[in-house]
Image (spheres, rainbow, N blue to C red):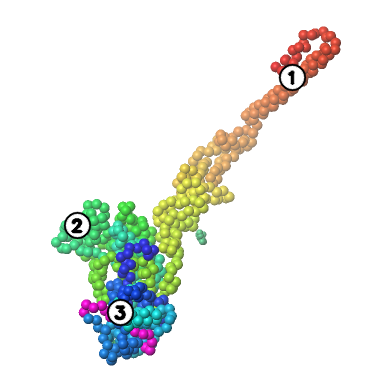
Amino acid sequence: MALKRPSLSLCLGFLLISLIVPSSIARFVVEKNSLRVTSPDKIKGTYDSAIGNFGIPQYGGSMAGAVVYPKDDKKGCKEFDEFGISFQSKPGALPTFVLVDRGDCFFALKVWNAQKAGASAVLVADNMEEPLITMDTPEEDGSSAKYIENITIPSALIEKSFGETLKKALSNGDMVNVNLDWREAVPHPDDRVEYQLWTNSNDECGVKCDMLMEFVKDFRGAAQILEKGGYTQFTPHYITWYCPQSFTLSRQCKSQCINHGRYCAPDPEQDFSSGYDGKDVVLENLRQLCVFKVANETKKPWVWWDYVTDFQIRCPMKEKKYNKECADAVIKSLGLDSKKIDKCMGDPNADSDNPVLKEEQDAQVGKGSRGDVTILPTLVVNDRQYRGKLEKGAVLKAICSGFEETTEPAVCLSGDVETNECLDNNGGCWQDKAANITACRDTFRGRVCECPLVDGVQFKGDGYSHCEVSGSGRCKINNGGCWHQSQDGHTFSACLDVDGGKCQCPPGFKGDGVKSCVDVDECKERKACQCSACSCKNTWGSYECSCSGDLLYIRDHDTCISKSGTEGKSAWAAFWVILIGLAMAAGGGYLVYKYRLRSYMDSEIRAIMAQYMPLDSQAEVPNHVNDERA
Ligand SMILES: *[C@@H]1O[C@H](CO)[C@@H](O)[C@H](O)[C@H]1NC(C)=O
Ligand SMILES: *[C@@H]1O[C@H](CO)[C@@H](O)[C@H](O)[C@H]1NC(C)=O
Ligand SMILES: *[C@@H]1O[C@H](CO)[C@@H](O)[C@H](O)[C@H]1NC(C)=O
């Protein structure tokens, strides 16, 4: 995941720490930040250091400094003032990173003393060989609580051996320069994290939009768990610009803005004459804000994540579906009140403020510790701007570090998000409740709506509003969506498994074949069984006809006939004629054969006898063989 992202975010892996809260139990993962020695050459390289649980890392990405190891007060437990030491760097010089030894007093006190003496950062060298630990604030210590609040410089613990390497280089008279790369950290005052994402519905602005969409999709699962559990309060925000008064009637402003130039977004294609306009983006942004508002009112603010991801998937600009119609379909599938959303959006052509967007513009202006929001995307966690990579893991970590220690939810500790989003409202996907078939599939990136493959039969459709079976085998699945019914031991189905399949009421029924097929009363409607001797009785899916007296009903002809009728006699006569004929033919054949055989024997005997005695008729002899073989 991480490697796919553009590198711009990689170099900004930073966040602020602000409030310092005396913690009770320091049971959390050591946040390592890399420390790079840039000079002297012989110790150049990257070393591990563990970020202190207090102080504020320098804002802006990385921080370079020159390391100083004080001659006295090497542990920094006393005020450096007492020794006449100052770390104040001269204007233009690199800031001072003070190296102190671990031991004798609280980490925080060392840092506090160094800060007071003008240090820009503190490196604490461990006093034993061990894996790095997190330097924490003292427990239940009233006197230290006062100054801990005021620590603003960053600090890090380094390994004993690395501390010695630095000291050796310094004692050689080398200038030791280092760079600190701080990992993200956020204020963690209580057990709820407030965070905001400044986002955009535009899906065609290149790498930035792709990255943002990817993030929203990836992060949705975690965001929803946090929100449902009441661990976070998330608010989406959308940046808009306004058109300068004198330009409100210009073509640019008209195509990019709504409410007479009050709220604008750049044209997605940078082309005012084609494709989508900036105002389409503003409108969709407004709709997403209203989706959030309406969802929040029904105490389900997390539905916003479903809406934005579904909208991305179902209504992309590329497919020319970035419009109200498609948005309404998404709103409907998520069970949101579209009337309320329309009402919230107001009239985009009105020459007046839109309260929702007005609020957004006001929120853009920075206050307190947060600057103006001018770039997208911007993530603000506990009122601190997140400067790290916009990636699920990193953001989750930042949010998780915003909880007071030990109050972080399980999702923060397991590092993984396990949930079956399909269990809730079927994930907003298509489903056939009767057949227990759903298009919702839970994946590690959240749920997807995809028409399923059931018993080797592939459903086709968008996965949200419809899925249908086609091809052979469809009647196996929920009877192909066609009508079917069982009654009195009979089952009838309207599913025909031919040419893509269709629903057609079986013979004896009429209807659309999908919702209903009703029995046809053959006696009345089809005029069946109407002969004078007939008596008709309708049954489900068919009819019964009986004939009065000794008559027999012939269904094919819909008529009653006498059991001893002429038809019967002639049939029997024909049978006998044929039987006798066959017998005679067989008998005749046998007689002919017998006669032939005898005459052959006769001539054979005669021929033999002729050799021994003269016979009366010689002429018969020579021909007998030929005659027999003819
Ligand atoms: C911390 O800063 C506040 C105001 O900035 C100040 O009033 C307070 O005296 C400071 N505390 C210490 C221990 O210096
Ligand atoms: C969402 O609802 C909560 C109360 O349920 C409220 O405190 C919060 O201000 C609402 N957020 C927005 C942006 O309306
Ligand atoms: C629906 O199917 C799933 C598995 O495919 C099963 O776990 C569930 O119990 C079924 N529900 C009903 C109502 O049949």
| N-term mark: 3 or 2 | 3
Query: Looking at this view, is 541 or 57 the one in front?
Result: 57
Question: Which image quadrant for residue 145?
Answer: bottom left
Look at mark 1 in the image and give the residue it sits on: 592
Please state, as top left, top right, bottom left or bottom right, where the N terminus lies in the image: bottom left
Q: Residue at x 28, y 82 (%)?
A: 119
Q: Determine the secondary structure under disc 3.
A: loop
Q: Determine the secondary structure under disc 2.
A: helix
Circle on res. 174: 3
Callouts 1 and 2 close, C-beta under 8 Å:
no
Q: What is the three-letter code of the residue carrying label 1? A: Val
Q: x and y percent of residue 35 in the render?
A: 34, 75
Asked if residue 233 is among those painted magenta in the image, a careful observer would answer no
Query: Looking at this view, is 416 or 52 the one in front?
Result: 52
Query: Looking at this view, is 527 or 268 the one in front?
Result: 268
The segment highlighted magenta reads 91-105
Q: Residues within 10 Å of mark 2 (few under 14, many from 20)?
A: many
Q: Determine the secondary structure under disc 1.
A: helix
